Amino acid sequence: MTKFRFNTNCVQGTYQPKPGEPRVLPIVQSTTFSYDDSDYVADLFDLKVGGSFYTRLGNPTSDAFEGKMNLLEGGIGALALSSGQSASMFSILNICQAGDHVISSSSIYGGTFNLFDVSLRKLGIDFTFVDPNASEESILSCAKPNTKAIFGETIANPGMNVLDFEKFSSVAKILDVPFIVDNTLATPYLCRPFEHGANIVIHSATKYTDGHATSLGGVLIDGGNFNWDNGKFPGLVDPDASYHGLKYAESFGAAAYIVKARVQLLRDYGCSPSPFNSFMLHLGLETLHLRMERHSENARKLAEYLYAHPCVEWVKYPGLESDPYYELGQKYMPKGASGILTFGIKGGAKAGKDLIKHLDLVHLVVHLGDLRTSILHPASTTHRQLNEQQQIASGIFPEMIRVSVGIEDIEDIINDFDKALRAAVK
Ligand SMILES: *Cc1c(COP(=O)(O)O)cnc(C)c1O
């Protein structure tokens, strides 16, 4: 088959109709699939043949979405899930059990931090959170004999630091454990983590993948570039009694991780996407390249404007030349730095609240990655479950405003901010 470039894959990747079939990916809104031979269905259950038999485990619309996501990231297999949270959860549960340990960057999405620090800890999995700016030696010193993974975000939400892939992947290689990357904010258009040493990539597809704020979803993608048979991952090497003693690494080779995530975790936990949501997320991907280009361009222009504004204390955006993460941004995201920026408003939390009241075009929403520009005060909303110390460790300050810059005319976005900033900061 001809290999196409990234933008072509966004528009036309994976779904290929046969003569007479719909040109547009159909929504297969069926939980079940019809067969006329029970031996064939037995082979499906035994994983001897592929095919849909029950939508909890797979569905043609979700397959197409997974296929496109996998193609865009350059992985060897993907699994669509019901949310980004379930993708983060699966990425760990697929290789860790009670008694295991994970090293994670401390600058991660608040929901992921809670999942790790509260819910997975209750299952007996231990986490150490490291400052992403710490030296390689200092991160390595957090390792334990039971360490099973390293976790980070390409662009941290909302700390805005760019992940030092070289440093984190080097730690993972030394420890011989997989490097898991949440690539939600960058998307594969801006950054392809497998090219920088990641072994597993996850997404909240709810954000830029959808792009229109319609559907919740998550994706787990396997780079196929990690050898699980190193004595640390018995779940991938030893026989699985629930599949007549199947050994994932032996039977599926490089695809062992993603096969296990589907046939064991998805079977048992059931965080399956609705076919309708998979359709919407697949539709979103068709314009990912255009949207990410414009989100990045508008965010850079708004960041430059705010940086020079008398009512603004500071701006964090890795696409700004003055930003401490500019170099890492150029290295890993040369096409743009995505659409999220944060800034500190003069007058602190109170001015921040007033600002939101004076904006007309820009709405307050608990979301990001939507094509409409939106705004949020993280300390009082998304990160309110964290205490102040944890907030600061995650890069959250009281005066901080997070903007998800949309794809409207930048002049209109800037005018809205200008008017509201002048009204809020007196
Ligand atoms: C939103 C988000 C998640 C969680 O995704 P949901 O789809 O809301 O469950 C995980 N990681 C990052 C970086 C996010 O922004």
Image (cartoon, rainbow, N blue to C red):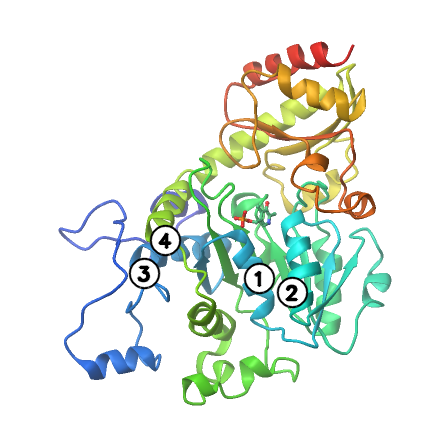
Report the residue at 40% width, 55% height from top: 273
Compare marks 4 and 3 and give the one earlier in the sequence. 3
The residue carrying mark 1 is 89
Which amino acid does the dot numbered 1 rest on?
A: Met
Specify whether tag 3 is near ligand 1 (CB below 8 Å). Answer: no
The residue carrying mark 3 is 59
Determine whether, in the image, residue 164 is placed left or right of residue 240. right
In whole angstroms, how far apart are the C-alphas of marks 2 and 3? 28 Å
Compare marks 2 and 1 and give the one earlier in the sequence. 1
Front in this rendered view, residue 154 or 99:
99
Please tell me whether mark 1 sits on a helix, a strand or a loop: helix
Determine whether, in the image, residue 269 is placed left or right of residue 8. right
Query: Does residue 80 sit above or below 40 in this rendering?
Result: above
Task: Select label 4 or label 3 by which is in front.
Answer: 4
In whole angstroms, how far apart are the C-alphas of marks 4 and 2? 25 Å
In whole angstroms, how far apart are the C-alphas of marks 2 and 1? 8 Å
Residue 150 in view, yes or no? yes
The residue carrying mark 2 is 120
Residue 401 position, x and y percent, is 70, 29
